[in-house]
Image (cartoon, rainbow, N blue to C red):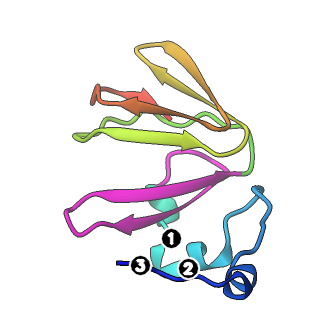
């Protein structure tokens, strides 16, 4: 199936944006993760549920902080858009820089 996108439509549809924050449409209060469920100070999160039971969450960290260790029964994949995030599993620190990702399939206690 061909899809035609004109130059005029394309220019009006695309907007360059700063990576310091996510666009407002992604931060709708209905998708916000309740503060009492967060294990890290200075973090703001939103979650979207997939049709197959999977979830996608995105986070904004406004300060350097240490999260409580958590254990999950599912794989987690994380991409750092900007800045640096240090993941701790079994006491081993792994720095994940902006533009990089990491897959945690260990399902053991981790500090994200």
Which region is colored magenta?
Answer: 38-61
As drawn, the label of residue 2 is 3
What is the C-alpha distance between the residues marked 2 and 1?
7 Å
Q: Secondary structure at mark 3?
A: loop
Identify the image quadrant of the N terminus. bottom left
The residue indicated by pointer 2 is: 28
In this rendering, is residue 6 above or below 68? below
Numbered label tally: 3
Image location (x, y in percent) of residue 21: 73, 61
The residue indicated by pointer 1 is: 32
From the viewer's side, name the closer residue of 91 and 99.
Answer: 99
Image location (x, y in percent) of residue 36: 47, 60
Front tag of 2 and 3 = 3
Q: Pointer 3: residues within 10 angstroms few (<14), some, or many (20+)?
A: few
Name the residue located 19 percent from the left edge and 63 percent from the top edge.
52
Name the residue located 21 percent from the left edge and 62 percent from the top edge.
53
* Circles 2 and 1: CB atoms closer than 8 Å: yes
Q: Secondary structure at mark 1?
A: loop
Question: Quick check: 50 left or right of 40?
Answer: left
Image location (x, y in percent) of residue 92: 49, 12
Would residue 55 be counted in the magenta stretch?
A: yes
Name the residue located 31 percent from the left edge and 35 percent from the top edge.
71
């Amino acid at each position: 199936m061909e899809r035609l996108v004109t130059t005029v439509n394309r220019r009006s549809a695309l907007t360059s944006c700063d990576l310091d924050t996510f666009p407002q449409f992604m931060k709708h209060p209905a998708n916000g993760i309740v503060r009492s469920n967060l294990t890290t100070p200075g973090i703001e999160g939103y979650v979207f549920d997939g049709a197959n039971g999977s979830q996608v969450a995105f986070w904004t960290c406004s300060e350097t902080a240490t999260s409580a260790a958590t254990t999950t029964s599912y794989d987690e994949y994380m991409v750092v858009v900007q800045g640096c995030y240090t993941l701790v599993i079994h006491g081993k620190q792994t720095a994940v820089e902006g533009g990089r990702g990491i897959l945690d399939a260990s399902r053991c206690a981790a500090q994200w």
